[in-house]
Amino acid sequence: GPSSRGRHNFGANIITARGEIFDHVKDVTVSRNMQHAHFKTLRFFRKCCRLVPTLINVHQLWTVTSPVKAKLQLAKLFRQNAHIRTPGLVDQMIKEGHHTLAQSLWHYNQSTHVLLYLHPDGVQRHDRGFSYLDDEKYQGKSGFLTDFYRGSRPNY
């Protein structure tokens, strides 16, 4: 029989009713004016800031960023969109933000996706591929290593 609202046990599988995962995501009501949209944005920003330490722990990002840096980055992202003056567009962005936040908490997003929002440089990639430019390949290497990597000695 049902063990909780929307869940049914069938053998070892737990079947989840549609929409139950996002039950805690509020359906955004239409803002009457920009003042109403502004306060909804503030509430969403506060919710994000409260959940930043949890997101860092869930995605194991404590080696990459700290809660303080992540909150500063979130504030920067919110300020980048401060020029938007259409209440409907603000509502849409808040709704997408709620869904992204819920997916990140449930670990549906990968850590690199979460880093786009929480890290000042976005995703720091060290795998940009092989560079054919000698300046990039041998930057910071000693003369011995540069010669060694270039293969300046003949192979016999």
Image: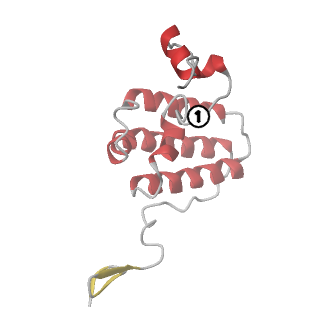
At x 68%, y 23%, the residue is 133
**Residue at coordinates 42% horizontally, 38% vertically from top-left?**
49
Residue at the bottom extreme?
1
Q: Is residue 78 visible?
A: yes
Q: Residue at x 63, y 41 (%)?
A: 35
Question: What colouring does the structure picture have?
Answer: secondary structure
Against 7, residue 75 (above or below) is above
Q: Image quadrant of residue 63?
A: top left
Number of dots carrying numbers: 1
The answer to whether 55 is drawn above or below residue 120 in the figure is below
Q: Is residue 67 above or below residue 101?
A: above
Q: Residue drawn at (54%, 35%), measured in percent from left and top? A: 125
Circle 1 crowding by C-alpha within 10 Å: few under 14, some 14–19, many from 20: some
Question: Would residue 142 be visible to someone looking at this image?
Answer: no
Q: Residue furthest top?
A: 143
Left or right: 3 in relation to 32? left
**Residue 4 position in % (x across, y down):** 28, 79
Residue 57 shown left or right of residue 90 in the figure: left
Q: Quadrant of residue 20?
A: bottom left
Q: Is residue 36 or residue 54 the one in the foreground?
A: 54
Q: Is residue 57 left or right of residue 102?
A: left
Question: Where residue 155 sits: x, y (%)?
Answer: 55, 25
What residue occupies the far front of the structure in this picture? 156
Residue flagged by tag 1: what amino acid is it?
Leu
Q: Where is residue 1 shown, x and y percent of the image?
A: 26, 91
Q: Position of residue 92 (x, y in %)?
A: 65, 54
Q: Which residue is mark 1?
A: 77
Q: Identify the secondary structure beneath mark 1.
A: helix
Q: Is residue 80 above or below residue 33?
A: above
